[in-house]
């Protein structure tokens, strides 16, 4: 249960979830600003207007990161802070904020890991079709180049996109996330344009000859058949194709899954010559966000149908199944390697209670310990796992769930903005120091 000496430990956040300052220093409107203020879209009508007020409290937050003893901090850059209209005039004050943040990280010996897109598309681009409009991918390339030229010499690693499956399906397929569109067929166009944006950003990056590593982060969910019945196994293949291979295959193999003709008919009209060559250009690493697994059975028509959890669940209703992380890492390494892998998000929401200035989140400690152990097991099995970022540093705006779901290892009182280390943060500090050891997997 050991990790290599150069293994990278970090914590992660995202711009809209923590920054606040939604209308300060020239920031433009994002799709999440618009979506969260649309009645009925976010639990309790919560918005990210203030969130964790990180925009003003970033020095305090960096001090907390340093206190944890981690090596790296993964944050995202808000596109509307840099280009308020999505394209055109650059907002220098937006760039300056991220320069201040990076300077503070470097002064404290923390490696900056920057994500270019964590879902906050400028609303002006959504007004012109958003990710259903091919031009948005080109605008993303322009935005990425501006950020690369400004911060390229001080960032340790870059992530182009965070979880394009969520942006495409939850944003354009079922409408649970911003911008709230609902078209299963059209969401494949959004997915393709997101991947094209990734490829175009890679192209811009490589033309600048910068030295940091660059990759993409995918949310991967291992799919397990509910039984050994052929119908359940085939339904699991379909579910895996939709959730995982639809993004892994174009990035690593240069084509969409060929065993899913029922989906290929939707994406084919969007694909132009050279698109998949751009999308499949070599990356330096793959980021994996892992939270849970899916158990799949076939319905009466043979289509995938998720089954109830077999083990305890988190406050999100997600099954706690650490073995899934091990299985996923081995599968990705086998089918898409060799390439360095990072866990760019892993964590859990529980019903945290602040009592007498303390948060005793034993469930989260157990969750992290079990997943760390499976990561160590994967490394021992030959998987080139290079780092692990906990989600999340802070309790924050949890998208459609507002502030009701708490993923942080640091408790945030959203009324006072006080930060309080949960027991999980204290445990993680001791783990990083080598005081706490992982238990062998039984």
Image (cartoon, grey):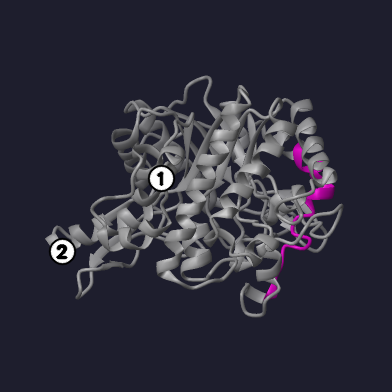
| Magenta segment includes 307 | no
Position of residue 324 in the picture relative to residue 43 (left or right)? left
**Up/down of 400 relative to 69, above or below:** below
Q: Which residues are magenta?
A: 45-62
**At x 45% / y 41%, what residue is drawn?**
279
Instruction: Kindly identify which residue carries mark 1.
Output: 273
Instruction: Kindly identify which residue carries mark 2.
Output: 231
**At x 23% / y 53%, what residue is drawn?**
259
**Up/down of 307 relative to 386, above or below:** below
> Around disc 2, counting alpha carbons within 10 Å, would you say few (fewer than 14), some (14 to 19), or many (20 or more)?
many
Dividing the picture into quadrants, the one containing residue 32 is bottom right
Position of residue 120 in the picture relative to residue 223 (left or right)? right
Q: Position of residue 88 (x, y in %)?
A: 75, 50
Please report whichever mark, 1 or 2, sits nearer to the chain's N-terminal start: 2
Q: Position of residue 329 (x, y in %)?
A: 36, 38
Mark 1 or mark 2, whichever is nearer to me: 1
Does any portion of residue 207 appear in the rendered image? yes
């Amino acid at each position: 249960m050991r990790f290599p000496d150069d293994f990278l430990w970090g914590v992660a956040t995202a711009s809209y979830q923590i920054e606040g300052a939604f209308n300060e220093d020239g920031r433009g409107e994002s799709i999440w600003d618009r979506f969260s203020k649309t009645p009925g879209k976010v639990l309790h009508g919560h918005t990210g207007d203030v969130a964790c007020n990180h925009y003003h409290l970033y020095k305090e937050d960096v001090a907390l990161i340093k206190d944890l003893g981690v090596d790296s901090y993964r944050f995202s850059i808000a596109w509307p802070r840099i280009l308020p209209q999505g394209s055109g005039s650059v907002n220098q004050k937006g760039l300056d904020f991220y320069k201040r943040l990076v300077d503070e990280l470097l002064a404290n010996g923390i490696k900056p890991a920057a994500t270019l897109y964590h879902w906050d598309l400028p609303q002006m681009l959504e007004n012109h079709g958003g990710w259903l409009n091919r031009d948005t991918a080109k605008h993303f390339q322009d935005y990425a180049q501006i950020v690369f030229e400004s911060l390229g010499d001080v960032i340790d690693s870059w992530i182009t996109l965070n979880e394009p499956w969520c942006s495409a399906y939850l944003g354009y397929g079922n409408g649970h996330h911003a911008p709230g569109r609902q078209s299963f067929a059209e969401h494949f166009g959004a997915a393709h344009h997101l991947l094209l944006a990734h490829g175009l950003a890679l192209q811009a990056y490589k033309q600048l000859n910068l030295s940091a590593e660059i990759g993409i982060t995918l949310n991967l969910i291992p799919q397990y058949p509910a039984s050994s019945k052929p119908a359940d196994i085939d339904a699991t293949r379909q579910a895996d194709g939709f959730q995982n291979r639809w993004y892994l295959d174009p990035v690593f193999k240069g084509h969409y899954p060929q065993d899913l003709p029922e989906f290929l008919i939707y994406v084919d009209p969007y694909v132009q010559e050279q698109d998949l060559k751009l999308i499949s250009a070599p990356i330096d690493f793959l980021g994996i966000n892992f939270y849970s697994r899916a158990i799949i059975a076939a319905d009466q028509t043979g289509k995938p149908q998720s089954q109830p959890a077999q083990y305890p669940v988190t406050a999100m209703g997600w099954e706690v199944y650490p073995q899934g992380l091990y299985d996923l890492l081995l599968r990705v390494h086998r089918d898409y390697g060799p390439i360095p892998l990072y866990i760019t998000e892993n964590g859990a929401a529980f019903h945290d209670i602040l009592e007498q200035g303390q948060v005793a989140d034993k469930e989260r400690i157990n969750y992290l310990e079990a997943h760390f152990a499976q990561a160590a097991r994967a490394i021992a099995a030959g998987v080139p796992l290079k780092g692990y970022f906990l989600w999340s540093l802070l309790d924050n705006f949890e998208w459609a769930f507002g502030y009701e779901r708490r993923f942080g290892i640091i408790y945030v009182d959203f009324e006072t903005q006080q930060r309080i280390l949960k027991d999980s943060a204290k445990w993680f500090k001791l783990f990083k120091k080598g005081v706490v050891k992982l238990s062998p997997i039984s």
